Image: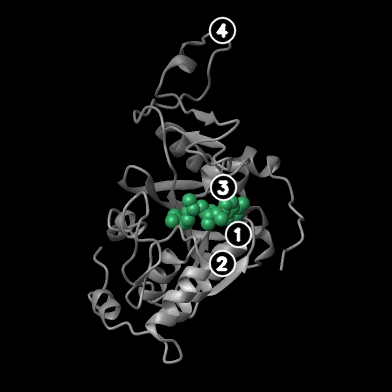
Amino acid sequence: MTPPATNAAARRDQHPPAALSRDEIRARVAALGPWFHNLDLAGVQTAPDHFLGDYPAVKWRGFRDAVPADLTGKSVLDIGCNGGFYAIEMKRRGAARVLGIDADPDYLAQARFAAEVVGADIEFRRLSVYEVGRIGETFDVVLFMGVLYHLRHPLLALDLIRAHVARDLLVFQSMQRGSADVAETAEDYDFWQTEPFDRPDFPRLHFVEKRYAGDPTNWWVPNRACVEAMLRSAGFAIAAHPEPEVYVCRCTEPDPAVAAERPTVTMPEQP
Ligand SMILES: C[S@@+](CC[C@H](N)C(=O)[O-])C[C@H]1O[C@@H](n2cnc3c(N)ncnc32)[C@H](O)[C@@H]1O
């Protein structure tokens, strides 16, 4: 699918809100930093020196054609929205409602400012993925990009997303390490047969006890087989795999054992 031709034109024609000069935007961007998302806010770059390049625009280019180009009338939830790049892109594709949530209030402040500058009507709330049950609605499209490996309880997060907020499409991304080969999943494994566990293509979630890339919030890094098995197990059928880290999934029924295992989360919402 091709994104609407209006996107590029809309970006070129983007002007700062009447109330803000470019210098004022530059000052606000500096005050709200450091930014992880490099956004172009009326000509002001928020993270021009990002270690991954023009991120996440460079990532988005690798999978944007696998996401519906026309989201007119659709609802979108962006979990771990950060500075709002994907939430804004979903709005540009015509989504009627976009809700961005993040656990970090500093990133939410960036996202609110970015949406204001580009004139996108997006709601942002401080919520953890573990609290999606509090939202009280389901969404046509759920984005869960770059968050899984930051969680101590990644499978719980996928189960909660499937149970409470996803009703059709999940757009998912995770860092992966280890083999990119995928072993065929067996229905069962013999107790005495240990060989499957030594295979690099067996689903593996690597636990990081201290830090990965200097970041103490990188807890679990899956290999490709693990990502795909976790998605299936939580009730997400892989419909497209447009680039190595990104999956577009359709909701299916999760494994019956999943519902029985899922705890109820009752954490209070933070202001
Ligand atoms: C690597 S960034 C990814 C941002 C964006 N989704 C992307 O793909 O570019 C991880 C984001 O997840 C957020 N995050 C971490 N733990 C979270 C949690 N438990 N619930 C919601 N967001 C979380 C972080 O604050 C951060 O904004």
- For the residues labelled 4 and 3, the Cα–Cα distance comes to 31 Å
Disc 1 and disc 2 in contact, CB within 8 angstroms: yes
Residue 119 versus residue 235 in the image, above or below? below
- For the residues labelled 2 and 4, the Cα–Cα distance comes to 50 Å
How many residues crowd around disc 3 within 10 Å: few (fewer than 14), some, or many (20 or more)?
many
Q: Is residue 34 left or right of residue 157?
A: left
Disc 1 vs disc 4: which is toward the camera?
1
Q: Which mark is residue 192?
A: 4
Pointer 2 residue: 108
Q: Position of residue 96 (x, y in %)?
A: 46, 78
Pointer 1 residue: 104
Pointer 3 residue: 158
Of the image marks 4 and 3, the number of the one nearer the N terminus: 3
Disc 2 vs disc 4: which is toward the camera?
2
- For the residues labelled 1 and 4, the Cα–Cα distance comes to 46 Å
Disc 3 vs disc 1: which is toward the camera?
1
Residue 260 versus residue 195 in the image, above or below? below
Residue 1 versus residue 9 in the image, above or below? above
Of the image marks 3 and 1, the number of the one nearer the N terminus: 1
- For the residues labelled 1 and 2, the Cα–Cα distance comes to 6 Å
Disc 2 and disc 4 in contact, CB within 8 angstroms: no
Q: Residue at x 42, y 37 (%)?
A: 176
Query: Element under label 4?
Result: loop
Q: Position of residue 126 (x, y in %)?
A: 63, 65
How many residues crowd around disc 2 within 10 Å: few (fewer than 14), some, or many (20 or more)?
many
Q: Position of residue 85 (x, y in %)?
A: 42, 65
Query: Element under label 3?
Result: helix
Q: Residue at x 53, y 45 (%)?
A: 148
Of the image marks 1 and 4, the number of the one nearer the N terminus: 1
- For the residues labelled 2 and 3, the Cα–Cα distance comes to 22 Å
Of the image marks 2 and 3, the number of the one nearer the N terminus: 2
